[in-house]
Amino acid sequence: MKRFRLLSILLALAMCLALVACGGDTTGADSGYGSTGQGSGSAANEPPTDGTSGEAGGEPVTPAGRALVVYFSASGNTKKIAGYIAEITGGTMFELVPVNPYTADDLNWRDSGSRVVAEHNNPDRHVELTTTQVENWEAYETVFIGYPIWWQEAAWAVDDFVKNNDFTGKTVIPFCTSSSFGIGNSGELLAQMAGTGDWQEGKRFSSSASKSKVEEWIILP
């Protein structure tokens, strides 16, 4: 009887550990991603990321000169953080809008036939934007770039903007939104893609981050 009880306890512990391990795989991109990122705020609706929890990374930053806040947001959360940054810095917001906007079905990463999954699996993916040109681009000294995390990367809707602009002489500060995972090396990958600019360490914000959280990150000169 004692052996049976001991075996039952051990089996129960093993099942708990298995559930905990699997739980880390049920979450993914950004909590402001609709079915895969910016919108619902539900970790269960996000594709896999790097597994870093908390509001990871991002030493306090001090923007220089005039600020531009560039962002892609599928359904709201990244836009909210971008708005806070613009309010704090007095910066100008610039939304990245795909020519073919994402629908809720497009963003369903659990559907192997969805658009976002097809794009993720295609190394030559390309998300065309309505425009990548910012009026008076030369006037901005600091450029914040915001996005949800998709599969440990910046949502690829930001790629064209990064590739099509010269960041020489600009301080570039990435930020992302996510329910539970970190920014990882997404900013570094964008910096490599850009090839120009002084790219700073990025910052991850939760889908429910308040303006005060953003203020803690941004130190005005």
Image: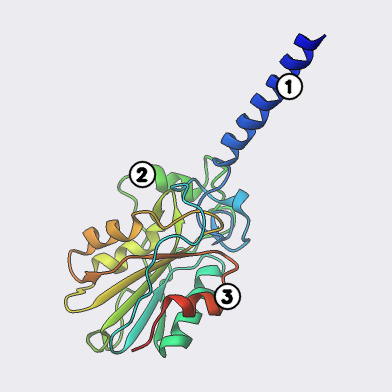
Amino acid under disc 3 = Ser
Labels in figure, total = 3
Distance between the alpha carbons at the discs numbered 1 and 2: 46 Å
Residue 162 visible in the snapshot: yes
Q: Few, some or many C-alpha atoms within 10 Å of disc 2 (few <14, some 14-19, many ≥20)?
A: few
Q: Few, some or many C-alpha atoms within 10 Å of disc 3 (few <14, some 14-19, many ≥20)?
A: few
Do labels 1 and 3 touch, CB within 8 Å? no
Residue 130 visible in the snapshot: no
Q: Is residue 100 above or below residue 137?
A: above
- Dividing the picture into quarters, in which one does residue 19 lie? top right
Mark earlier in primary sequence (1, 2) = 1
* Residue 35 marker: none
Q: For the C terminus, which image quadrant?
A: bottom left
Q: How is the image coloured?
A: rainbow
Mark earlier in primary sequence (2, 3) = 2
Residue behind mark 3: 210
- Element type at mark 2: loop
- Element type at mark 1: helix
Residue behind mark 2: 122
Mark earlier in primary sequence (1, 3) = 1
Residue behind mark 1: 9
Q: Is residue 93 above or below residue 178?
A: below
| Spot occupied by residue 202 in the image (x, y as percentages of width and height) | 36, 65
Q: For the N terminus, which image quadrant?
A: top right
| Spot occupied by residue 119 in the image (x, y as percentages of width and height) | 41, 48
